[in-house]
Image (tube, rainbow, N blue to C red):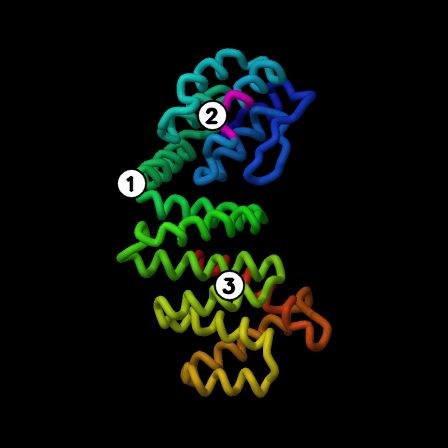
Amino acid sequence: MSSYILCQTKKAEKPYYIENISTNIYSIEELCYYLYHNLYLIDSTIINEGLCKWLEEELELTRLAAKLRPYLGKFAGAEDILYPVFKEINYLTYEELRVLNGKIAKLNKEELPVREKKKGDALVENGMYVNAIHVYQKLLECGGRLKGQPELTESIYHNLGCAYSYLFQMEKALEYFQKAYEVSSSEKEMKTYLLAYKSLHTPKEYESRVKELQPGETVLKEVKEAIAHFERTPENKIASGDIDRMLEGFIKEYHRSTGA
């Protein structure tokens, strides 16, 4: 961020509660940080009259509140909200502002289903798995909006599986990993599905399922190597038979690396 003086503005006695990620903030700096790193979570749960009152009463930022109020309850571009907030303390460097402009331009061009999917992804990144599941499921319920977008549909199913796995609901995770595979038949989804299946079934059942799916030696080898690699990592040492924890950790790592 730019070279502004940290906490140069008043710190609130009463925090502002950000519902999306169940977090309290106490300063304009914290608000800037949240907005900059969570573009897809900017909605009426944070930009509302409650925020404006908090800015006025707790931080004494009356002018900033006045700049934001015209956009409450109306369609407004992200830039209409972000720029006044960031400018209040010169939060961004020129280069950071340029990057932000590019992100906003990209967001404004995206169709609503894509933005909603990325909102779910942002919730997952913030550990709000139940909220993310609600976003993904709402998207799937409006199936017509996903028509002709198999890659997006696959990614939603995959990330639903990830969210359920982070909650240790492996049966539901397996269900959605299977749906993701059925959409694309990709090796990536096959590997994730087999890992989830292996965590829930006996070796005999796993071998039987492998015979049904016939994933190929490459996929089977990569699944085996993935498990072995995870178990070799010191911080991932787990008790014998505790494959649910192994899968949960592996899927988090896999989710980050693929950016699905």
For the residue marked with disc 1, what is the amino acid?
Lys
Instruction: Identify residue for label 3.
Output: 254
Q: Secondary structure at mark 1?
A: helix
Question: x, y (%) of residue 58?
Answer: 63, 17
**Main SS class of the magenta portion in the image:** loop
Q: Residue at x 43, y 27 (%)?
A: 82
Residue 12 position (above or below residue 203) = above
Q: Which mark is residue 109?
A: 1
What residue is shown with label 2? Answer: 86
Numbered badge on residue 195: none
The 10 Å Cα crowd at callout 3, few under 14, some 14 to 19, many 20 or more, is some
Residue for point 48% across, 71% down: 193
- Image vertical order of residue 121 relative to residue 202, above or below: above
Of labels 2 and 3, earlier in sequence is 2
Q: Are marks 2 and 3 in contact (CB under 8 Å)?
A: no
Chain-order first, disc 1 or disc 3: 1
Camera-side mark, 2 or 1: 1
Label 2 sits on a secondary structure element that is: helix
Identify the element where label 3 is drawn: helix
Q: Which residues are magenta?
A: 46-50
Counting from the top left corner in percent of width and height, residue 212 is at: 44, 85
Amino acid type at image mark 2: Phe
Is the residue marked by circle 1 packed among few (<14), some (14-19), or many (20+) residues within 10 Å?
Answer: few
Q: Position of residue 189 (x, y in %)?
A: 43, 69
Q: Tell me which numbered mark, 2 or 1, is placed earlier along the sequence.
A: 2
- Going by the numbered disc 3, the residue's amino acid type is Tyr
Which is in the foreground here, disc 2 or disc 3?
3
Label 1 vs label 3, nearer the camera: 1
Measure how far apart labels 2 and 1 are at the Cα level: 22 Å
